[in-house]
């Protein structure tokens, strides 16, 4: 299958690109970062459709504005990229018979649930980011019902993320540059997910969408109906940010660094966060796709060039 990735320099985009470059079954037909394709620019997406999409089997949209707090004050940009972007791409994919996977988020839910959210649960976003992503899902699926929208949560991968930030803070404390214990919120629960594992799952889903054949209208050339609509895909298990941080310290050789739980309200952040956003991944599991535990995924990430321990001392 010939794949095209947008947002190619983000955490997920980089994992997808490196896996597609290394794989033998898949071909990377295009990797577009923001500089080469602005998904919120309809003209640029139309140009892509006219020049490239004819030679592509599947597009994965990993482009997004993900700075949750900044979205509160820059909502026009959040909606342009997170809501209009997937709609522009969906229209181009539909018109060229190209399959599409779009990536979305647990922040489309308000967090009031006490058991994992299924795909059928109504959207109820609380932040601008969540609303922009929810609108992107709706607009894409209205235009292209055969598209697959994969929601994930708490991503870590190449680039800046929670794991990097906890390790930097621990290192500063170990070096004596900063004093005091680390304080991390213990009242938000979700599932940390390694972008490399998500990329692997998306490649498996992409193959199930159909091996190298163009879509013919909404009729799909396959005996089994390929997955379409909403799907949840995360590593297994759940954590609070505090328990995630504790595991990061333990796996990175910083077990002696002091850490204590705190509350979200103490942080006074601009954007509200769901207090519980664990996603039920049973639908993906029914297709044979189950990602390993988040703890095992963290260990794998720390073993890559992206997550190497700065002090080299892992427990
Ligand atoms: N990160 C998480 O914790 C998390 C959790 C749940 C779901 N998700 C979803 O997972 C997907 C991948 O997330 P991620 O963590 O890989 O995000 P990321 O690291 O922030 O990467 C997103 C990429 O999109 C690019 N981008 C921004 N505006 C763009 C535009 N107008 N056109 C094209 N590209 C643009 C960004 O470029 P610049 O950096 O240059 O702006 C960045 O390289 C997103 O859909 C996100 O909503 C993420």
Image: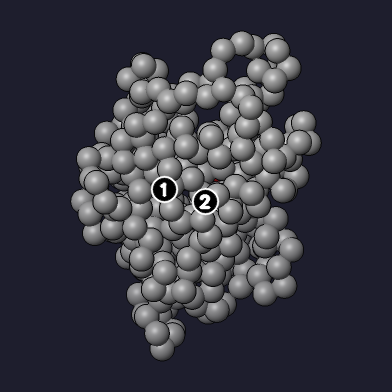
Return the residue found at the far bottom: 223
N-term mark: 2 or 1: 1
Quadrant in the rendering for residue 240:
top left
**Mark number displayed over residue 238:** 1
Residue 157 vs residue 65: left or right? right
Residue 291: x and y, percent?
51, 61
Name the one closer to the observer, 192 or 155: 192
Q: Which residue is mark 2?
A: 294
Helix, strand or loop at mark 2: helix
**Mark number displayed over residue 129:** none
Quadrant in the rendering for residue 48:
bottom right
Quadrant in the rendering for residue 269:
top left
Query: In this orientation, does residue 136 appear?
Result: no
Residue 300: x and y, percent?
65, 52
Q: Residue at x 63, y 32 (%)?
A: 255
> With respect to residue 164, does 199 lie above or below?
below
Name the one closer to the observer, 134 or 250: 250
Residue 28: x and y, percent?
67, 62
Residue 251: x and y, percent?
64, 41
Asked if the residue at tag 1 contacts the one at tag 2, i.e. Cβ–Cβ closer than 8 Å, the answer is yes
Crowd band around label 2 with a 10 angstrom C-alpha radius: few (<14), some (14–19), many (20+): many
Crowd band around label 1 with a 10 angstrom C-alpha radius: few (<14), some (14–19), many (20+): many
> With respect to residue 256, does 95 lie above or below?
below
Residue 45 vs residue 125: left or right? right
Q: Residue at x 52, y 24 (%)?
A: 259
Find out if the beta carbon at label 1 lies less than 8 Å from the nearest ligand 1 atom: no
């Amino acid at each position: 299958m010939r794949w095209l990735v947008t947002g190619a320099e983000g955490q997920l985009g980089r994992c997808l690109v490196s896996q597609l470059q290394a794989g033998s079954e898949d071909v990377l037909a295009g990797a577009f970062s923001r500089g080469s394709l602005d998904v919120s620019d309809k003209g640029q997406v139309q140009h892509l459709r006219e020049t490239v999409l004819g030679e592509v089997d599947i597009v994965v949209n990993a482009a997004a504005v993900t700075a949750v707090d900044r979205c509160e004050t820059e909502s026009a940009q959040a909606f342009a990229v997170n809501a209009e972007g997937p709609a522009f791409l969906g229209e181009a994919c539909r018109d060229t018979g190209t399959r599409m996977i779009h990536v979305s988020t647990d922040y489309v839910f308000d967090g009031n649930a006490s058991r994992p959210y299924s795909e059928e649960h109504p959207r109820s976003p609380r932040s601008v980011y969540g609303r922009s992503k929810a609108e992107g899902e709706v607009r894409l699926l209205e235009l292209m019902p055969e598209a697959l929208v994969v929601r994930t949560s708490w991503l870590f991968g190449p680039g800046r993320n929670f794991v990097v930030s906890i390790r930097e803070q621990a290192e500063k404390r170990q070096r004596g540059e900063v004093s005091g214990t680390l304080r991390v919120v213990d009242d938000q629960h979700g599932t940390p997910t390694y972008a490399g594992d998500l990329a692997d799952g998306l490649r498996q889903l992409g193959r199930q969408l159909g091996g190298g054949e163009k879509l013919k209208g909404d009729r799909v050339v396959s005996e089994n109906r390929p997955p379409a609509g909403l799907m949840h895909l995360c590593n297994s298990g759940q954590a609070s940010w505090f328990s995630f941080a504790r595991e990061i310290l333990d796996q990175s050789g910083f077990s002696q660094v002091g850490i204590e739980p705190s509350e979200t309200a103490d942080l006074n952040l601009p954007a509200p966060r769901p207090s519980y956003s664990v996603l039920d991944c049973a639908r993906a599991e029914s297709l044979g796709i189950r990602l390993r535990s988040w703890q095992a995924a963290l260990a794998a990430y720390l073993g890559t060039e992206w997550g190497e321990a700065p002090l080299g001392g892992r427990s």
